[in-house]
Image (tube, rainbow, N blue to C red):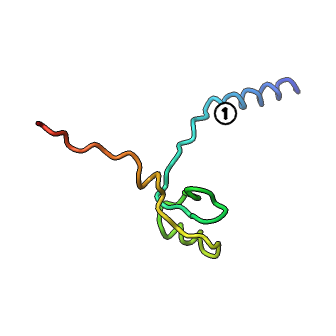
């Protein structure tokens, strides 16, 4: 009984680890910025309203995420000449 339980737990543990994918790093466009949150800040807000709600009463401000604002630009049209 004890061996079968251990084998079952081990099987589910290995199956759970096999299904792990790398965390997708997302650069949300709004950051809470100020003392104590580092640079570029706490960038986990999709809207300015979410950022302002989180910043309320914390003596911090909301700013644009520099990684999202100044990220790699898309290529435009190629010149023919």
Q: Residue at x 34, y 47 (%)?
A: 73
Q: Could you tell me which quadrant the N terminus lies in?
A: top right
Q: Picture coordinates of residue 48 (x, y %)?
A: 48, 67
8 and 43: which is toward the camera: 43
Q: Position of residue 15 (x, y in %)?
A: 66, 29
Kindly give the residue lying farthest to the right in the view shown: 2
- Badge count: 1
* Residue drawn at point x = 53 percent, y = 61 percent: 31
Label 1 CA crowd tier, 10 Å (few <14, some 14–19, many 20+): few
Q: Secondary structure at mark 1?
A: helix
Q: Nearer the viewer, residue 63 or 17?
A: 63
Location of the C terminus by quadrant is: top left
Q: Residue 34's quadrant in the figure? A: bottom right
For residue 60, side relative to residue 78 (left or right):
right
Query: Residue 37: percent from the left, percent from the top?
Result: 64, 60
Image-based side of 1 in relation to 27, left or right: right
User: Which quarter of the figure has residue 13?
Assistant: top right
Q: Position of residue 39 (x, y in %)?
A: 58, 56
Residue positioned 41% across, 55% down in the render: 69
Q: On the image, numbered disc 1 is attached to which residue?
A: 16
- Of all residues, the one furthest to the left in this rendering is 81
22 in relation to 76, above or below: above
Residue at 16% in and 39% down: 79
From the viewer's side, name the closer residue of 2 and 49. Answer: 49
Q: Work out which residue is located at the far bottom of the displayed protein and give it.
A: 57
Left or right, residue 36 beside residue 80: right
Image: 32 above or below 9 = below
State whether residue 63 is above or below residue 22. Answer: below
């Amino acid at each position: 009984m004890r061996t079968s339980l251990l084998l079952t737990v081990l099987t589910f543990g290995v199956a759970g680890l096999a299904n792990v994918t790398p965390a997708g790093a997302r650069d949300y466009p709004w950051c809470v910025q100020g003392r104590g949150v580092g640079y570029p800040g706490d960038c986990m807000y999709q809207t300015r309203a979410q950022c302002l709600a989180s910043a309320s009463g914390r003596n911090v401000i909301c700013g644009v995420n520099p990684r999202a604002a100044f990220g790699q630009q898309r290529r435009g049209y190629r010149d023919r000449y």
